[in-house]
Image (cartoon, rainbow, N blue to C red):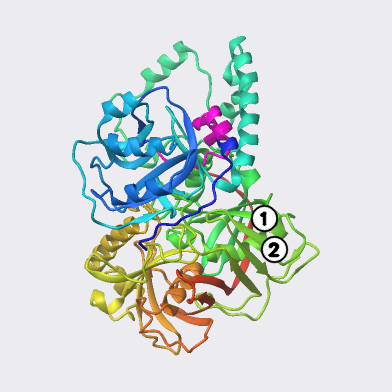
Amino acid sequence: MRNVIVTGVPRADLAIVDQLAGLGAATVHEAIGRAGYLGPGLRPIAEGVRTGGTAVTALCWPGDNLMIHAAAEQCQAGDLLVVTTTSPCADGMFGELLATSLAARGVRGLVIEAGIRDVAELRAMGFPVWSAAVSAQGTVKETPGAVNVPVSVGGQIVRPGDAIIADDDGVVCVPRGEVTAALSAARARVAKEEQARRDLAGGQLGLDLYGLRAKLAARGVEYVGAGDYAARSEDRKPDAPRPKSGDAATLPPLSGAGSSTGVRCMLMRGGTSKGAYFLAADLPKDPAERDDLLLHIMGSPDPRQVDGIGGAHPLTSKVAVISRSAREDADVDYLFLQVGVEQATVSDRQNCGNLLAGVGPFAVERGLVRSAPVRIHMVNSGSVATASFPATDGVVDYDGDTAISGVPGTAAAVVLGFAGTEGSATGALLATGRVADVVDGLSVTCVDNGMPVVVVAAADLGRTGYETVAELEADEELGHRVQALRLAAGRLMGLGDVSAASVPKVSLVAAPADGGTICTRTFIPVRVHESIGVLGAVSVATATVLHGAVGHDLAAIKPGQTRFDVEHPTGHLQVEAEVDQASQPPKVIRSGVVRTARKLYDGTVFPRR
């Protein structure tokens, strides 16, 4: 990390924050689309306390509260201090004396993803605290960290000045610029719940109030009398074998659209990936129901995905969810979801630049826009891309003479220009605050220009960097080493425990072997990529530009160069990246790439029940 104390940060409107606090964490969380919840691991030390404030953040080393003392100086009346550590820590990092100091400055409470102590004293003085642990173990004050930088708490990014709402239900973060919209949405939800409360109190069932009877019927739920059910149960063989854990029969029942009706879907190739594209309106609004439905559509978990449309590989088990955008700077919203193959997982923690190539054409096909260019809000990171491709009057022309490595033949070019990709998942281009780090005994650069990537020299892992995908995937020792590196780097990058996440990626780099800029072999995160992801390539190219970064001394770069040829196992990927290195930390000026896309199938997909 970069050891800084950022001063003078802008804060959310405290009057609006107070109103949000009055509505409660659960209401606000639901109102903003079930976002911002900092997880069940943070619990209050006293019941019945409800507060809200503007975030001052502190990033500390485990067992060291030096930066909490530094953060106290930056606090002002109405703030709420948010503390996390670079790796998990349960030590008592905060107690009565620090609370006394913060209370004197008008601080409204503490949220800490670590331990506290002096609980009785904190309760007696009425200082609200939400913590992950209680421990008598004290700390030192030796190691510098950072104050008022973006931090990851419970898998959510908290930025200084954001609104923090906390009560018995937990802690929710609302981005500083979204508090007004959040208040409006939360008030509307409260009004709706008041009416529902009156209806339920009057004897109406939730089944009727929320229209759930039709949903039960669509999911195949039937009403059976007790006598009939008992008779059916007696007909079953008592010695019938029970399904083993992991069998399809043990999957939870389908909670999305029923297999009898199906779901409208378009299968598209985007860049060197293939995925299922859906209109958001055609999927359940509830994220849990949506993800459950997608698992059944793709056929996961199953290494062959034989009972779904997934292609038995991470590159072909992808989903794009598209809708019209409410943003003034975008035409459509694009949510990328990585569906696990052998695991029942659906992750939204990364972008996908390859599927992005198909978003514009899909939007035209579905009538969301009439022609290109299409401005695309990438929901996963909040950044915006512009896609230019041949399309007029609602018709897309997929034919063209542009070839990209890893795809046979040619197609029409889709030119993607990116804005705001810097710090897409980690909040900073250099997620640790440094150009290079030593992680698990290896020199690495942790970079995030649209995709969190750990760049490591192949030679440092005892490999050439020119191995085939098959050779790398057969190398179990290398696979274990790469995964250990990824887990350690994920914590250092503020992403927390990434064992079940698809990011960060790990990219092995070597000197170019075929006239390019840099040679890559990328793990995504366990399997080896047949080529390289678009935003992954942008991030690697960005790292090679930076003096002192891993890969900089291996790359063939000319002064002022902004277009880079990234070599990968099946060819080359041309990307653009321009970085202002005079700025500290370095700032991304622009980035882009040329891809192609093609519609493969349009119709109805029928999920497994």
Mark 2, residue position: 374
Q: In the rendered image of this protein, does residue 525 appear above or below residue 411?
A: above
Secondary structure found at label 1: strand
Magenta region: 18-39
Q: Dot 2: within a 10 Å radius of its alpha carbon, few (fewer than 14), some, or many (20 or more) residues?
A: many
Separation of disc 1 and disc 2 at Cα? 8 Å
Vertical position of residue 141 compared to residue 532: above or below: above
Residue drawn 25% across the image and 50% down it: 64
Q: Secondary structure at mark 2?
A: strand
- Examine the rendering and report whether any part of residue 95 can be seen: no
Q: Earlier in the sequence, mark 1 or mark 2?
A: 1
Quarter location, residue 330: bottom right
Asked if residue 275 lies left or right of residue 550, the reply is right
- Residue at 50 percent across and 17 percent down: it is 224
Mark 1 — residue?
A: 332
For the N terminus, the image quarter is bottom left
Residue 368 part of the magenta segment: no
Type of amino acid at the residue the image marks with label 2: Val
